[in-house]
Image: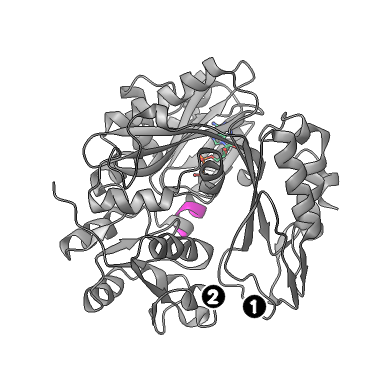
Amino acid sequence: MAVKKFKKILAANRGEIAIRIFRACTELGISTVAIYSEQDKLSLHRYKADEAYLVGKGKGPIDAYLGIDEIIDLARKKDVDAIHPGYGFLSENPEFAEACERAGITFIGPTPEIQRALGDKVSGRKMAVEAGVPVVPGTEQPISTEEEALIFAKSAGYPIIVKASAGGGGRGMRVARSQKELLEGLKSAASEAKAAFGNPAVFLEKYIERPKHVEVQILGDKHGNIVHFYERDCSVQRRHQKVIEIAPSIYLDDKKRAQLCDYALKIAKSVDYVNAGTIEFLMDKEENFYFIEVNPRIQVEHTVTELVTMRNLVQAQIRIAEGYKLSDPEINIKSQKDIELRGYAIQSRITTEDPANQFAPDFGTIKAYRTAAGFGVRLDAAAGFAGAVITPHYDSLLVKISTWGLTFADASRTMHRALQEFRIRGVKTNIGFLERVITHPTFREGKCDTSFIDSHPELFL
Ligand code: ADP
C-alpha cells in the first residue's frame, strides 16, 4: 500500500477539537480547511484555519455540521485530500466514512466496517465476548418488549441500567432499582435516545455499584500493527459524564495494568482496528474489569495520554490515514516498548455552566479572560478570549486544562494552581467547583469512583 501524503485536510467539526486538528496539520505542513455554521460565524476555529467556508445555510446550528453531501461537495471543490471528523457530529457515522471514500477523500478514522462492528454498544459487547473479554452481564440484543426486560431483571437482579445502544455523552441511560423504575426507564431512555441519536434501541446491563471507569487508548495502522498507550482513569464524573481525567491510573499495579491493556488489544486485534480508538471498561470493588464500549474516534481526554506518553495522537492519526506504518520514522513506534509512561497528567474540563444552579449552561460575552500558563500547563480552547460570545447552540466546553507532573501530587498541585490562576468574567463557569474536586481528600488519595461527585453535593456550592 503506497503512502499518499495529504496536502489539505478539512476538519468536519468546530470548537477546540477543530483547532487541535489544525495545529497538528500545520505542524505537518498540511493546509487546513474549516467549516462553520451561521451561528459560528464569529467562532475562533474559523479563523484558525487557512480557509473557512460557511455550511448549512438555513439549517439548525447542529445540522450544519451533519450535512454529509454538502461537506463532501465542498471538500471536493476545494481539493481536500482527507477529512478529520474530530469527536461528536459525524465522527462515528459509517455512512459519512463511506461517502468520503466514494468521493476519493480519505476519512481519518477507522473503516466503516470497524465503526459498524464496534460503534454500537450492543455490537461492541458481542465483539468483546467473542474476543474472550469480560463484559458486564447484560442483554445480548436490544429490548423489544417489557417481558424481555423483566426476564433479564429476574435473572440478574436489581439495580439494572437501561442504556441506549447508540448512546454517548451519558445520554440515554437510566438506573433502575425496582420493576417500576425499570419499566419507566425503558420508555424514557428510548425516547431520549431517539431524540439524541435518531435510534430508540435500548439494552440492559447489571448496574455495578460505585465502579471506577478506566479506558485504554489504542492506535492501529493499515498494515495490521496495533499498540496501546496505556490507560486513563475517568471516574470523576457527574451524571455519568466525565469531568476530570487522569493518566495513567494511580491505583492499578503493573499486573492489573497489563491485564487491562491486554483486554483492550484483544478487542482491537479481533477487528484489525485501524487509527485511534478507546476501549472503555468499568472496574468493580474486587478489581474485576468489564468492557463497556469502544469509542472509534479521538476523545476529548486524549490530551492526558499525549502528555504522559509524549506522543502526538492527532498527528499519528493523520500519518496512519496517509498509509504510514507505526514503525515508519513519521510515527516512530517500532514496538509496544516504544510507548513509555512518564509522570502523570490530569485534565479538567472548564465549562460555561453554573454549579450552584444545577449546572445550567450560561451564555453571553466573555468580558475578561486571563489564562493560566507556566510549567506543566496545556490549554485547548476555542472561545478562550475576551469578547468571545458564548451561544446556547453548542455544548458548554470552554477550555480543557491539562497539567503534567512527575507524580500525581505534582500534577494535582499544578492543576490547582492553574485553576486558581484562571480568571473568566462575563459568563459563569465551573472553575470553583473543579477546584473543590481537585483539593478534596478523596481525589488527592486517588479514591474517586464514578459516584464521587453525585454523592458530594457540597462540591457544587
Ligand atoms: P456513554 O457512551 O454515554 O459515555 P458509557 O457506556 O461509556 O456511556 O458509560 C458512561 C458511564 O456510565 C460510565 O463511565 C459509568 O459511570 C456509567 N455506567 C455505564 N454502564 C454502567 C454499568 N453497567 N454499571 C455502572 N455504571 C455504568
Mark 2 lies on a secondary structure that is helix
| Residue closer to the observer: 344 or 298 | 344
Which residues make up the magenta segment? 191-195
- Which mark is drawn over residue 241? none
Please state if 127 lies on the left or on the right of 173 as rendered: left
Q: Is residue 192 above or below residue 72?
A: above
Task: Residue at 26%, 78% (x, y): give it.
Answer: 78
Image marks 1 and 2: residues in contact by CB distance under 8 Å: yes
Q: Which residue is mark 1?
A: 388
Residue 288 visible, this angle: no
Residue 353 image point, x, y percent:
71, 62
Residue 260 image point, x, y percent:
48, 23
Q: Which residue is mark 2?
A: 44
Q: Is residue 228 above or below residue 355?
A: above
Mark 1 lies on a secondary structure that is loop
* Quarter residue 285 falls in: top right
Amino acid type at mark 1 = Ala
The quadrant of the rendered image in which ligand 1 is seen is top right
Query: Is residue 30 covered in magenta?
Result: no
Amino acid type at mark 2 = Leu
Residue 447 image point, x, y percent:
72, 28
Task: Residue at 47%, 59% (x, y): give it.
Answer: 195
Residue 453 image point, x, y percent:
74, 41
Task: Residue at 25%, 47% (x, y): give it.
Answer: 111
